[in-house]
Image (cartoon, rainbow, N blue to C red):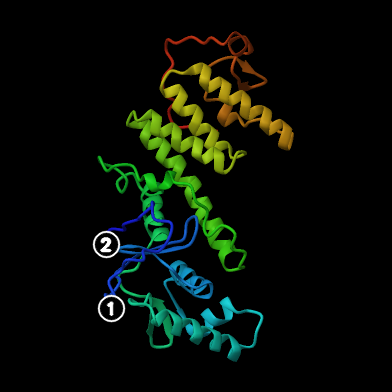
């Protein structure tokens, strides 16, 4: 089912036909929480948002687990009562978003989740080359900004937030490599720089940036980026870039490690001949 996002609609639509069933299209958990219908955003009470978000991340869970997770500081009976109240409110929607399956709860059929779309795209990129080959357009969903439910401090969100952050970082690096091979340098650089923005001290992300610059024969840009990362690493951690990153430059060897020539860096010039996109990076 194709997800349709109405990015221009900030408030729920007021002109819905009375008595008409509202088709649910998607649950958005990246950025601000939003439940989307065919005609725009659907208002959801805060307590119901937490239930929908939990099921959006876990798809299916026993009632007792849901109640204990969402209301951890009260007795089980009280937590189950709170869950029943939330379910009652959700059932009053023209098209309920949650259904019961025995003792378990799950999202209603047809409700897609942006986290699922993102995960599928990321795993395709980080999987085998056969899975991600061909002329399929790059999954630009990976380039979109948006942390998982920012501002939500619930304990059950933190592991998922970190899992998805790490998956995004690996997928952005893989996307940058694949786009570089295809000669799509602008998008490749965008993916690599987005990765750097998410985690500025991640060396593999900086390797991806340098690789794009070298593939375009923009040697000075590659050196400039390397030197900026080198300064950042020294200031933050007192470390030097690894031989893996330094070895991407086919220049002067110092102390057993390949390093960009200081003369080249200072003069702002670099030989243009013979500089090609780097092969596989080896430590």
Q: Residues within 10 Å of mark 1 (few under 14, many from 20)?
A: few
Quarter of the rendering containing residue 40: bottom left
Query: Gap in Å between the C-alphas at discs 1 and 2?
Result: 25 Å
Which residue occupies 40% across, 64% down?
12
Which residue occupies 36% across, 63% down?
13
Mark yes or no: residue 282 visible. no
Instruction: In this rendered view, identify the residue nearer to me: 168 or 253.
Output: 168
Residue 100: horizontal and vertical position, in percent?
39, 84
User: Compared to 245, does 109 lie above or below?
Assistant: below
How many numbered tags mark residues here? 2
Mark yes or no: residue 87 visible. yes
Question: Which sits earlier in the primary sequence, circle 1 or circle 2?
Answer: 2
Q: Residues within 10 Å of mark 2 (few under 14, many from 20)?
A: few
Instruction: In this rendered view, identify the residue nearer to me: 186 or 236.
Output: 186
Q: Secondary structure at mark 2?
A: loop
Residue under pointer 1: 19
Residue 207: horizontal and vertical position, in percent?
52, 32
User: Compared to 139, does 226 lie above or below?
Assistant: above
Residue under pointer 2: 1
Residue 263: horizontal and vertical position, in percent?
62, 9
Identify the mark at residue 205; answer none if there is no mark.
none
Task: State if disc 2 and disc 1 touch (CB < 8 Å).
Answer: no
Quarter of the rendering containing residue 268: top right
Say which of marks 1 and 2 sits in front: 1
């Amino acid at each position: 089912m194709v997800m349709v996002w109405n990015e221009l609609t900030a408030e729920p639509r007021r002109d819905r036909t009375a008595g008409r069933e509202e088709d649910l299209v998607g649950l958005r958990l990246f950025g601000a929480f939003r439940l989307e219908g065919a005609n725009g955003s659907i208002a959801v009470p805060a307590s119901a948002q937490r239930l929908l978000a939990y099921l959006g991340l876990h798809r299916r869970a026993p009632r007792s687990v849901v109640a204990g997770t969402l209301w951890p500081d009260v007795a089980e009976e009280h937590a189950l009562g709170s869950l029943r109240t939330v379910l009652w409110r959700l059932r009053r929607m023209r098209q309920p978003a949650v259904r019961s399956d025995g003792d378990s709860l799950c999202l209603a059929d047809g409700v897609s989740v942006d986290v699922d779309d993102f995960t599928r795209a990321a795993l395709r990129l980080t999987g085998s080359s056969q899975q991600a080959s061909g002329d399929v357009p790059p999954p630009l969903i990976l380039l979109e900004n948006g942390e998982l439910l920012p501002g939500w401090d619930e304990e059950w969100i933190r592991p998922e937030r970190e899992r998805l952050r790490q998956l995004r970082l690996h997928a952005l690096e893989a996307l940058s490599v694949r786009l570089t091979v295809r000669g799509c340098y602008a998008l490749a650089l965008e993916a690599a720089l987005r990765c750097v923005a998410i985690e500025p001290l991640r060396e593999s992300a900086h390797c991806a940036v340098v690789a794009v610059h070298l593939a375009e024969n923009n040697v000075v840009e590659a050196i400039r980026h390397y030197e900026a990362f080198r300064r950042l690493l020294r200031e933050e951690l007192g470390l030097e870039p690894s031989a893996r990153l330094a070895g991407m430059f086919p220049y002067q060897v110092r102390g057993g490690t390949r390093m960009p020539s200081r003369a080249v860096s200072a003069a702002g010039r670099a030989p243009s001949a013979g500089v090609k996109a780097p092969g596989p990076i080896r430590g």
